[in-house]
């Protein structure tokens, strides 16, 4: 019960960036406005915060953490503030990468961040102690958790940890779930497909993890989040 509540309370998850400096970094990097929101409202993004918190609890001190699809590196920077010593991440957006470089410099954290297509990475970390993967894979048409785990398992140490989130199949039952959330008012012919391209329930995540050499250590479902998301902590066997 304590853990359940702790995962839902937004304390200690924010990043020390002033609004003025954030505005300046947004101007310099030209990153999408979403990335500023992800920094200034980080504590409300429970799926991201909980994944990071769980990693801090299990990783060794001075850990090496990698994040594919890391955006501006907000999660990695939070992990750096909590003691992780090697922080690396990749994102397809060069603007997000520039934003991450500014933020890391401001916080005095050794973030290595580069531009890459993380579905077909040209560069993988070696022997990471932990990996966080939230809020990107299930937005990409054609992506799958199975292919993701096959690609990234070798970058983790044996015994290393992967924290990830996933949209649950609860979303399959929402009216209009096949359409992009911003297009629901448009005539059908003008709507884009949903931005939530992968939806999986816990047993599917667990089976896919096992098939790829991971064991499930812990999970929690944010029942009221829209779309409903669950967070998983896996360990590479
Ligand atoms: C909603 S943001 C989430 C960022 C970060 N994971 C977080 O939760 O704070 C999604 C990110 O995925 C990135 N992205 C989308 N497709 C990608 C790809 N194929 N490879 C790497 N990054 C990708 C976008 O550029 C964007 O920064």
Image (cartoon, grey):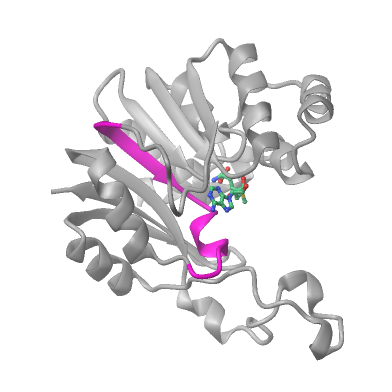
User: Does residue 16 appear anywhere in the picture?
Assistant: no
Q: Residue at x 79, y 30 (%)?
A: 26
Relative depth, front residue between 8 and 160: 160
What residue do we see at 34% from left, 62% from top?
147
Task: Note whether 75 is above or below 234 in the view shown.
Answer: above
At a point 36% along the width and 37% down the height, the residue shown is 124
Residue 52 picture location, percent across and down? 43, 38
Percent position of residue 234, x then y: 26, 51
Q: Pick the residue in front: 64 or 1.
A: 64
- Segment tinted magenta in the rendering: 126-142
On screen, residue 43 versus residue 126, left or right, reads: right
Q: Is residue 220 visible?
A: yes
Q: Judge left or right: residue 108 versus residue 66.
A: right
136 is within the stretch colored magenta: yes
Give the residue furthest to the top: 108
Percent x, y for residue 191?
A: 78, 81
């Amino acid at each position: 019960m304590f853990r359940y509540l702790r995962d839902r309370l937004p304390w200690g998850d924010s990043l020390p960036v002033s609004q003025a400096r954030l505005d300046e970094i947004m101007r310099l990097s030209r990153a999408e406005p979403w990335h500023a929101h992800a920094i200034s409202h980080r504590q409300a993004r429970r799926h991201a915060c909980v994944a990071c918190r769980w990693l801090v609890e299990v990783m060794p001190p001075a850990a090496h953490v990698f994040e594919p699809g890391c955006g501006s590196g907000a999660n990695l920077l939070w992990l750096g503030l909590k003691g992780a010593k090697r922080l690396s991440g990749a994102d397809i957006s060069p603007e997000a990468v520039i934003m991450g470089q500014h933020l890391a410099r401001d916080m005095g954290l050794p973030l290595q961040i580069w531009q890459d297509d993380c579905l077909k990475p040209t560069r993988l970390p070696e022997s990471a102690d932990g990996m966080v993967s939230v809020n990107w894979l299930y937005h990409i048409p054609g992506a799958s958790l199975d292919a993701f785990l096959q690609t990234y398992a070798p970058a983790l140490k044996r015994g290393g940890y992967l924290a990830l989130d996933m949209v649950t199949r609860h979303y399959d039952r929402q009216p209009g779930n096949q359409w992009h959330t911003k297009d629901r008012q448009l005539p059908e012919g003008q709507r884009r497909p949903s931005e939530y391209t992968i939806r999986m329930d816990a047993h599917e995540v667990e089976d896919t993890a096992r098939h790829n050499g991971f064991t499930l250590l812990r999970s929690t479902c944010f029942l009221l989040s829209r779309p409903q998301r669950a967070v998983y902590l896996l360990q590479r066997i």
